[in-house]
């Protein structure tokens, strides 16, 4: 009888500990819950938490984009609205930080999100320096990163169109010889 009581106690303790552990991934951040997909390209913002952006406008509206590329396009489409806050996912922590105070790195050997020339944000200069030491790139303020996003827009859109066309052909099973 003592053995049975002890076994039940051990089992109950195990179950309580097991049930208290988090299941799978943690809940997505609030901004990702509110804006789960980028409205411009449809990309999953949780998957791209390291590059996501949140733009809040003076009318109280906000937009969640997957990257600085899509945030730049969004701001052009809403040129009559003034951003009051622009936040970005820190590359290394995925934490949403003030884009204007972030330490940006332009370029390097890591492919960007929606762009060939990456633009990554870091919360500290030390984190940006560590990234540049390993992957290259150059430091920049937010204004330069945004300017680079606009400068790269034409080539990036061409690259995205080409990739999406290739994906469509591949999913349709189109032979290589018919691709142009």
Image (cartoon, rainbow, N blue to C red):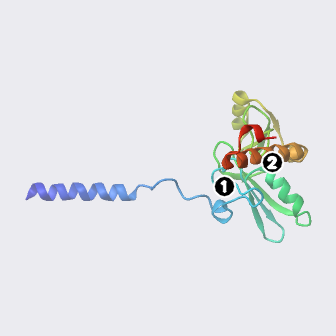
Q: Position of residue 2 (x, y in %)?
A: 9, 57
Quadrant location of the N terminus in the rendered image: bottom left
Tell me where residue 53 sits by quadrant.
bottom right
Give the residue at x 69% y 45%.
170
Q: Position of residue 42 (x, y in %)?
A: 72, 57
- Nearest the viewer among 50 and 45 is 45
> Would residue 25 be visible to someone looking at this image?
yes
Q: Residue under label 1, please give it.
A: 44
Q: Residue under label 2, please give it.
A: 161
Determine whether the residue tagged by mark 1 lies in a helix, strand or loop: loop
- Nearest the viewer among 111 and 144 is 111
Determine whether the residue tagged by mark 2 lies in a helix, strand or loop: helix
Whether 8 is drawn above or below 126: the answer is: below
> Would residue 142 be visible to someone looking at this image?
no
Of callouts 2 and 1, which one flags the residue occurring earlier in the amino acid sequence?
1
Picture disc at residue 148: none
């Amino acid at each position: 009888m003592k053995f049975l009581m002890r076994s039940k106690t051990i089992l109950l303790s195990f179950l309580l500990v097991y049930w208290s552990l988090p299941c799978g991934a943690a809940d997505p951040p609030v901004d990702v819950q509110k804006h789960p997909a980028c409205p411009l390209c449809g990309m999953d913002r949780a998957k791209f938490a390291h590059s996501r952006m949140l733009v809040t406008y003076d009318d109280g509206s906000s937009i969640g984009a997957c990257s600085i590329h899509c945030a730049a396009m969004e701001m052009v489409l809403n040129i009559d609205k003034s951003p009051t806050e622009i936040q970005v996912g820190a590359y290394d922590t995925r934490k949403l930080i003030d884009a204007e105070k972030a330490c940006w790195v332009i370029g390097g050997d890591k492919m960007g999100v929606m762009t060939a020339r990456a633009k990554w944000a870091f919360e500290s200069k030390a984190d940006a320096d560590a990234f540049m030491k390993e992957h290259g790139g150059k430091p920049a303020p937010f204004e330069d990163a945004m300017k680079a996003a606009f400068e790269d827009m034409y080539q990036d859109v061409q690259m995205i169109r080409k990739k999406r066309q290739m994906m469509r052909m591949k999913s349709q099973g189109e032979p290589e010889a018919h691709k142009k």
